[in-house]
Amino acid sequence: MTARIFGFAFTRFNISSRTLYSLSGIDYRYLLWGESTMNRYLKLIIDKQPKYLVGMGIYTGRDKEHIRIETVCTNQFRKSYISGDTIQKQVIKPFVQESGVCIFSQSIGASYCNLISWKIMSAISEGKLKCQYTFLHIPKSMNVELVRSEVQKLLNHIL
């Protein structure tokens, strides 16, 4: 039986979306831009209930030689809280392991990458979504073929 793997990335012309569309084994791909597409995507994945969900976004910070496997998200989006009035954290338990240039990280930030991760992890913790989730932060300047190869290796163990 084939694993049902859904993947998403942000916008059309960056390394995360190029990686998403170059991978084999992804059953459904979706590009996000803004909160309205995130909310539609959240409804879709709750309806379809994939076994695995992998998200990809770009970053320009330190460790530009590593793909970051995020392990924590928070309820913060930019300078506001998504829910509540104090900072909250949720642990992301990735279905992939560190290898090669891929390392675990707790630095997802407070942008759209964190916002969608918070919404997905909330749906999982509330029992609305029954899947395993992984979010990958890909350096904007990293070689596309290297990224494709390394991410494909991460996913091969579930294919």
Image (tube, rainbow, N blue to C red):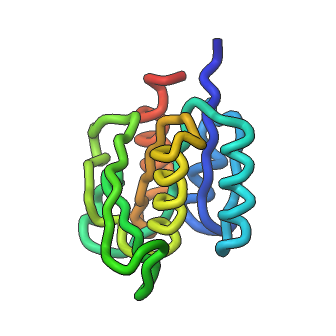
Q: Quick one: which residue is furthest to the bottom in this view?
A: 79
> Which x, y percent locates residue 85?
38, 80
**Residue 152, relative to residue 108: is it above or below?**
above
Q: Quadrant where the N terminus lies?
A: top right
> Which x, y percent locates residue 24?
62, 33
Taking the image as shown, residue 86 lies to the left or right of residue 30, namely left
Q: Nearer the viewer, residue 114 or 60?
A: 114
> Which x, y percent locates residue 23?
59, 40
Residue 100: name its quadrant: top left
**Residue 135, relative to residue 25: is it above or below?**
below
Q: Quick one: which residue is furthest to the top in this view?
A: 1
Residue 139: name its quadrant: bottom left
**Residue 97, relative to residue 116: is it above or below?**
above
> Which x, y percent locates residue 102?
31, 46
Taking the image as shown, residue 23 lies to the left or right of residue 44, namely left
Q: Quadrant where the C terminus lies?
A: top right
Q: Nearer the viewer, residue 108 or 89?
A: 89
Residue drawn at x 61%, y 58% is 17
Q: Nearer the viewer, residue 51 or 25?
A: 51
Residue drawn at x 59%, y 43% is 128
Taking the image as shown, residue 9 lies to the left or right of residue 70, namely right
